[in-house]
Image (spheres, grey):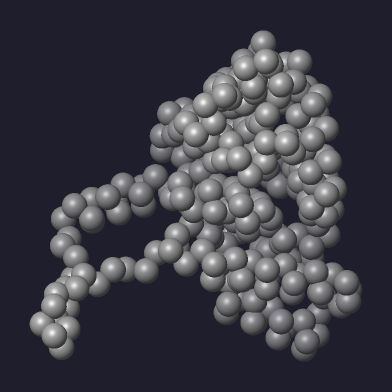
Amino acid sequence: MENQSLVIRLATADDKHYSATITAEMEESAKARGTGIAKRSPEYIEKKMEEGKAVIAYTQDGTWVGFCYIEAWQHEKYVANSGLIVSPPFRKSGVATDIKRKIFELSRQKYPEAKIFGLTTGLAVMKINSDLGYEPVTYSELTTDEEFWKGCRSCINFEILTSKNRSNCMCTAMLFDPAEATAKVLAAQTVKAQTVVTPTGVLKRRRKRKFKGNFKLFERWVKFKQYVLLRSRNKNNGSGTGESKKNSILSFFFW
């Protein structure tokens, strides 16, 4: 762990005294970004701690640093690592990555066959997810559990979500599929890399392009998507030739 002075561990009922601080920071962070986050009460956070479905970070002297929790949907077929939040003084220190890794490992232990997904507007979180093996997906590949989508009602962008019939919004959907991950490992073990001979006779391996290696391009796609959706909302004309054209462009570039 890079943050040697921090404790990052499974949260327990003994950590309930941090719940109000955590929920307050979640709300402030959403306001500062100008984007949505589903509001959670201190009682909800405390329940996750009691159930052993959360990871918490703090300093040796007990100062709260970060938090994230697990939600299971659709009879535990889908799992979300939600509410990732880091105290402002500790941001850009690598602690968010450590928390995400820890909560991802916990999710894999508790729900080994579940698909792990996330919705976020934060590029930093998208990068962390990418490194863990998540891939960007359409909203149709996420859980259909109505209880999950009810959590979006407190988001300031809920109007966009409903206007798009829950098929798109400001958040980017990302998914880790354990079955696909296993298949990739098996394929890598059984299929040799292709090689090509250059004019000089030197053999080179032909590598398949991966999402992780093209994150800058993905970042531009995300910004373009958000620009289109915000422009659509501001003009408040959810139909017509102009809107259809913009949605077509978005589908081509993003999905």
Q: As displayed, is residue 35 above or below residue 194?
A: above
Is residue 148 at least partly visible in the picture? yes
Left or right: 72 as drawn, with respect to 168: left
Residue most extreme to the left: 201
Q: x, y (%) of residue 218?
A: 55, 67
Quarter occupied by residue 60: top right
Question: 75 or 254, which lies in front?
Answer: 254
Q: As displayed, is residue 171 above or below residue 196?
A: above
Q: x, y (%) of residue 141?
A: 54, 56
Is residue 39 at least partly visible in the picture? no
Q: How many marks?
A: 0
Left or right: 212 as drawn, with respect to 14: left
Q: Residue at position x 88%, y 72% from top?
A: 234
Q: Residue at position x 83%, y 32% from top?
A: 24
Q: x, y (%) of residue 112?
A: 41, 34
Q: Residue at position x 24%, y 72% from top?
A: 206
Q: Residue at position x 30%, y 54% from top?
A: 184
Residue most extreme to the top: 14
Quarter occupied by residue 252: bottom right
Residue most extreme to the front: 5
Quarter occupied by residue 150: top right
Q: As displayed, is residue 65 above or below residue 91?
A: above
Q: x, y (%) of residue 255?
A: 56, 71
